[in-house]
Structures are given as structure tokens and as C-alpha cells.
Amino acid sequence: MNWNRRYFLLTLALFLAGCASHPIDFSKAKTVPKEEAVVFGRVNVIYKDEPKVWGKLSSPGVFYVLVLPSGSSEAFSHMLREDGSFYWHFPPGSYAISGFQWVTRGGTRSGRIFAEFTILERKSITYIGKLTLIFNGNYRFSMRIEDDYDQAIQEFRKKFPEIKEEPVKNLMKLEVPR
């Protein structure tokens, strides 16, 4: 393993250790905290041409994404469940899904993502899209943002039937490579 890769892994490990413990999972809270908004979407992980499902006995390990508020050095860590759909709550502002860590019996993969999204208003419900990560090998991956709004809204309504507001679509954007 080269020096840059080791440095990145060490930095990511330290970064994860310093992640905020503030729970962001709205599906566990069931009510929107005062001055915050709900943001939802999905992180779809594809490995060897198959989408991964998390949290089952045959699960391919544990997959975390890091969510970094704009202007902050402290990220939130979120473990993917099932198909990778997420329901978070945050104050209005700019955020980025900044990286991932995938822990398996065979080792740990980690990487930088930087998919930026914005929550415009408190008490709003914002759909930010489906982030698909496609692993082409042990350490190589590509990514794309997809608009799965209609299906995501149906799932949101099933999961939270008491919420009647219409979600706003504001898709995340991948950082432009330099």
C-alpha cells in the first residue's frame, strides 16, 4: 500500500473517530426537531454488478457515509441500512456527503465522495436524490446522482404517513473534478 493511501486511511479513521454523536436519523426520531428540516434520499452501493443490502445476516459488511456541514470540520456518521435509503434531520444550510467507510471481514475500504446538498428552509422536507457508488475493483469506484423522486416519495409516504407536506426536490451535486 502506498504512502498516500495509508495517510488517507489514517486521516479517515481519525475523522470517523471525531464524528459528531448527534443522531441524524429521522426515522428514529419520528418528529422534526425545532428549527430543523427533513432530508431524504438513498445511497446505492453496487459491487460486482449487484446492489448491496445492509443489515442482513448475509450482509456484505457495514457501510458508513460521512455528512459534513459546510464550514465545519466535524462530520456526522451514518450507517446504511437495507437498500441504503436514509431520512435525516438537519438545520437549514449546506452539507456534503463527504466520504465513506466500508468495513468487511476482508478489510476496510474508504474514499472521498463530496456530493453537496442544501436544505433551504426549516420545517421543510427535501429529497436530495440517489447517490450510486459503483465499485469496479477493490479500491476503484465511480459515482453518479440519480433522480428517483417518484419511487422515493412513495416510500416516504409509507414510512411517515402522518407527514402531509409535499417534499421539495433539490438534488445533490457531485463536486466538479479539477
Image: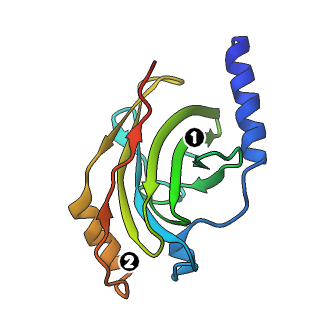
Image position, residue 111 (x, y; %): 57, 31
User: Please, what secondary structure does the residue beneath circle 2 have?
Assistant: helix
Q: Which residue is mark 1?
A: 100
Q: Residue at x 25, y 54 (%)?
A: 148
Figure quadrant of residue 124? bottom left
Image position, residue 125 (x, y; %): 39, 70
Q: Residue at x 51, y 63 (%)?
A: 92
Could you tell me the amino acid type at mark 1? Phe
First in sequence: mark 1 or mark 2? Answer: 1
Question: Badge 1: few (under 14), some or many (20 or more) residues near its Cα, within 10 Å?
Answer: many
Up the image or down, 42 lies above or below 156; here it is above
Question: Badge 2: few (under 14), some or many (20 or more) residues near its Cα, within 10 Å?
Answer: few
Q: In the image, which disc is placed on residue 90?
A: none
Q: Residue at x 48, y 70 (%)?
A: 37
Nearest to the observer: residue 132 or residue 59: 132
Q: Which residue is mark 2?
A: 159
User: Please, what secondary structure does the residue beneath circle 1 have?
Assistant: strand
Nearest to the observer: residue 33 or residue 66: 33
Figure quadrant of residue 126? bottom left
Protein image colouring: rainbow
Up the image or down, 24 lies above or below 54; here it is below
Q: Residue furthest top?
A: 2
Nearest to the observer: residue 172 or residue 64: 172
Image position, residue 103 (x, y; %): 63, 41
Could you tell me the amino acid type at mark 2? Lys
Q: Residue at x 32, y 78 (%)?
A: 158
